[in-house]
């Protein structure tokens, strides 16, 4: 290479290498400080697109877990109310048994009847008053197969927990039968049937079977709620596993391997320092021409 003054090619080459090493050092510093291998689209365009889709699914799954937990709380609210109703039904059957015997007169049966009807009214009150976040659970609004509007749910309640909208994968419906006294066929609020009144010995005897059927109807609702709670808990477990594994995959794309990146950082740091030193040397080489000129 000729010794020239106007164009110091060695300095230009050293400057180019310094710029490249410094840029790589900047990237390593950014990755190590942020903890992200993919921080901008330039780092890995395809990886960034995949990562963002994964992050959306992870966030959605976590919300789905919260949705399912809310549904469990709702189911437990309904089951707790039915447990109280169960106590009332047992007392009503006890009263019907008491009124069925011939050792009581009509006036005494009327007193027993008064408590019987009070228990029926309390069952209706509990069923009507039991709600979760403004959604009435036991008054019959959640029975059936049709979904109501958001303000006044009517029919089966849709619980959504998946990342899409496929019924077999992402949601199912909660259906809860009515548990008021009229739904159970007991008390004055119901149609005149076997459980209507225990004011007579014959009526009390007939009420025993009606109350027994009411207890069975109530137990069917509780059994369905218990099965639903188990299903929701399994859904939560499955979603948690999916979210965890998807998070691991997203981490492999997005997060920096600190050990590997630190090795790259040290390499780029040494190359940068070396390029700086060589640039200083290259900048001093044209001075040799001055020696030749001065010697002439």
Image (spheres, rainbow, N blue to C red):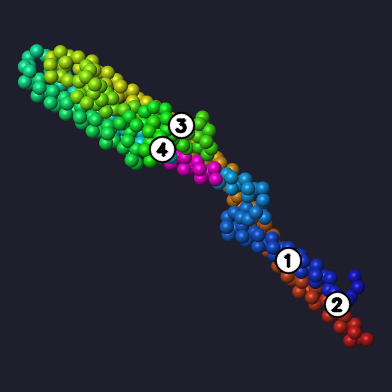
Q: Which residue is identified by label 2?
A: 6
Place of residue 177 in the rendered image (x, y in percent of width and height, measured from the top left): 34, 27
Mark toward the start of the polypeptide (2 vs 4): 2
Question: What's the CA distance linking mark 2 and mark 4?
Answer: 81 Å
Which residue is found at the position 6% from the left and 20% from the top? 107
Tag on residue 19? 1
Q: Residues within 10 Å of mark 4 (few under 14, many from 20)?
A: few
Which residue is found at the position 70% from the left and 65% from the top? 22
Q: Which residue is identified by label 4?
A: 149
Q: Residues within 10 Å of mark 1 (few under 14, many from 20)?
A: some
Q: Nearer the viewer, mark 2 or mark 4?
A: 4
Mark toward the start of the polypeptide (4 vs 3): 4
Question: What's the CA distance linking mark 4 and mark 3?
Answer: 16 Å
Which residue is found at the position 20% from the left and 17% from the top? 207
Mark toward the start of the polypeptide (1 vs 2): 2
Residue 272 higher or lower than 68, as above or below: below
* Of the pair 221 and 294, the residue shown nearer to us: 221
Q: Which residue is identified by label 3?
A: 172
* Of the pair 125 and 95, the residue shown nearer to us: 125
Magenta stretch bounds: 56-66
Hey, which residue is sitting farthest right in the picture?
Answer: 296
Query: Where is the C terminus found, in terms of image quarters?
Result: bottom right
Q: Nearer the viewer, mark 4 or mark 3?
A: 4
Which residue is found at the position 22% from the left and 17% from the top? 193
Mark toward the start of the polypeptide (3 vs 2): 2
Question: What's the CA distance linking mark 1 and mark 3?
Answer: 59 Å
Question: What's the CA distance linking mark 3 and mark 2?
Answer: 79 Å
Viewer can see residue 233: no
Place of residue 81 in the rendered image (x, y in percent of width and height, measured from the top left): 28, 32
Query: Where is the N terminus found, in terms of image quarters?
Result: bottom right
């Amino acid at each position: 290479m000729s010794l020239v003054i106007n164009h110091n090619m060695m300095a230009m080459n050293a400057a180019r290498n310094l710029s490249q090493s410094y840029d790589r050092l900047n990237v390593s510093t950014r990755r190590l400080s942020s903890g992200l291998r993919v921080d901008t689209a330039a780092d890995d365009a395809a990886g960034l697109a995949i990562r963002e889709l994964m992050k959306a699914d992870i966030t959605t799954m976590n919300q789905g877990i919260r949705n399912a937990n809310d549904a469990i709380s709702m189911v437990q609210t309904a089951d707790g109310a039915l447990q109280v109703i169960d106590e009332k039904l047992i007392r009503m059957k006890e009263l019907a048994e008491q009124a069925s015997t011939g050792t009581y007169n009509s006036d005494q049966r009327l007193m027993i009847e008064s408590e019987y009807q009070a228990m029926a009214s309390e069952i209706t009150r509990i069923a009507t008053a039991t709600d979760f976040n403004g959604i009435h659970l036991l008054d019959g609004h959640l029975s059936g197969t049709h979904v109501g509007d958001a303000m006044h749910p009517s029919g089966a309640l849709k619980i959504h927990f998946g990342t899409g909208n496929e019924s077999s994968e992402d949601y199912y419906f909660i259906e809860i039968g009515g548990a008021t006294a009229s739904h159970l066929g007991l008390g004055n609020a119901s149609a005149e049937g076997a459980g209507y009144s225990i004011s007579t010995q014959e009526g009390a005897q007939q009420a025993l079977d009606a109350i027994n059927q009411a207890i069975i109807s109530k137990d069917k609702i509780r059994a369905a709620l218990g099965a639903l709670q188990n299903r929701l808990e399994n859904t939560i477990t499955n979603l948690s596993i999916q979210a965890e594994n998807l998070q691991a995959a997203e981490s492999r794309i997005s997060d920096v391997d600190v050990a590997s990146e630190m090795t790259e950082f040290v390499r780029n740091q040494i190359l940068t320092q070396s390029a700086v030193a060589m640039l200083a040397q290259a900048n001093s080489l044209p001075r040799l021409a001055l020696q030749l000129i001065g010697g002439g």
